[in-house]
Amino acid sequence: MMTSEAVQSIEVTVRSIICSELRVEPGILTNTTHLMKDLGADSLDALNIALRLEETFEIKIPDEAIPNFLTIEDIITGVRNHMSHT
Amino acid sequence: MKVEDVQPNMTKRRVVVTGIGVVSPVGVGTEKFWSALSAGRSGISAIEDFDTSALRTTIAGVCRDFHSEEFFDERELSRLDRVSQMALAATEMAVKDAALKAGDVGGFDTGVILGTGFGGQRSIEDFCGAFFSNGQGRRSAIAIPKSMYNAPSSNIAIRFKARGPNITVTTACSSGANAIGQAFYLVRYGHAERVIAGGADSPITPVVMDAWKEMRVLSTKNEQPARACKPFSANRDGFVLAEGAGIVILETLESAVARGAPIYAEIMGYGSTADAAHITFPDPEGEATAMMRALSDGSLQPSEIDYINAHGTATKLNDASETEAIKRVFGSRAYEIPVSSSKSMLGHSMGASGAIELIAATMAIKTKVLPPTINYEEPDPQCDLDYVTEGPRDVSRLTGVMTAMSNSFGFGGNNAVLTLRGISV
């Protein structure tokens, strides 16, 4: 199990990656914010965010998992799951 | 969807330039560009963007007045290589200049034909850097769409919804001229009603500068950047690398008149040949034949040309070969035709140069002022034509419309020549 500090730190980092890749202000992100529907991201943005997450957390996100990495909540959960599997 | 009855028009439709957009080392926009060029001002300066200490040449034609954030937001910028940024900015200016509204440009009747020599070179270097630095560099999922050679023309199509033929021409230094020539044919023979045509290149990078260094064709007169490029002068020592974009809107004379559009000039003819000799050594016969074809394609006689905007790179080989080619085409009249090199002021923007120089020739016709060849200092027996070396030349004494020729010769032996004429109103 991860400590609550570790979980919080993942959240902060994920939000910061999304903000920097999509050039949006942190204040507009909620847990249910959808990268494509709410932030105008496209598939290339999603791939770039996946790449940053892989580099930052030293995880491997398989191709088929990328469609599940589209809301803030799902991304955070996904990163946590992948981290605990590696 | 039904198949439309589209028949190529085998009668030659007259094709005119109705809009101009330019990003150049002497300024952004036609007004700044032409006021500098027609006054003989150089745009060459010391490179400041990266360390040049290992290079023999430390100067270039950098577009210092091009501030991409004036045209794009941060998100857009992250997706666009500098070459696409310049091409899009020039297109925006050209569309506006042609008095076309964004909606008028869209549709399957509008093509985009763009020349580039280096494409998204900066982005290529970024992702190569990331790859070769063993994970230290920043990788990106956008590297391919940002760096591919057709990115600028595709980005233009996307932004302006231009859904007709979209083709990128890459013939080194003649890319921009070949692009305009191909676009001219599309409109002339009815394959498109209007075409956004021109060239863009942004090759001033550490890797490209180093590669040119090994070819020893760049000027090393670093101490006086504005005086470095000396086309046709005996003491010339090579070209100065530059960046930029030149875009013209081509459409039929009929459509331009019908919508009351401003008309800069008529494209008369286009000649395109290959030397098929050596990959870099120029061949006057290939060049002369392209010039002859640009004349005959426009039903022009050599006696009708009032001005030649030369390729004029300031390399030993080009300037002598081009001079020889002009003499073969024009005979004794070669000595009476003013020939000038805009590269003396702009440097050599590779795939953009042919388009930017077509714009220079267009403005010369329109204003009846010939841009000079600056920095001419010593006569070369092999280069003995009238190179407009005394400064800008007022030719308003010429009655009637002017007719000009614009030469572009690329490495690979790719020659492209355009002829153009003013429009009497």
Image: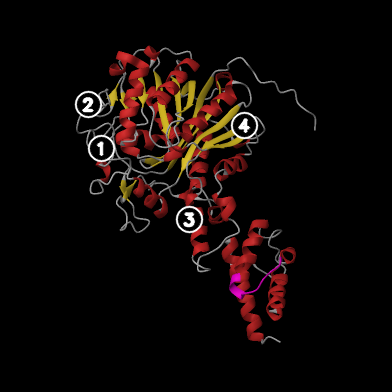
In front of the other: A40 or B183: B183
Q: Provide the secondary structure element on which disc 4 rests.
A: strand
Chain containing the residue with disc 2 = B
Chain containing the residue with disc 4 = B
The percent coordinates of residue A40 (x first, y second) are: 66, 56
- Write the start and end of the magenta stretch as one range: A55-62
- Along the polypeptide, which appears first: circle 2 or circle 1? 1
The percent coordinates of residue B254 (x first, y second) are: 58, 18
Identity, as a three-letter code, of the amino acid under mark 3: Glu
Q: Residue at x 52, y 46 (%)?
A: B84
Q: Name the residue under label 1.
A: B236
Query: Would you call the spot at circle 3 few (<14 residues within 10 Å), some (14-19), or many (20 or more)?
Result: some
- Along the polypeptide, which appears first: circle 4 or circle 1? 4
Q: Name the residue under label 2.
A: B381
Say whether residue B302 is left or right of residue B76: left
Q: How much space separates mark 4 and mark 2, taking CA atoms?
A: 47 Å
- Closer to the eye: label 3 or 2: 2
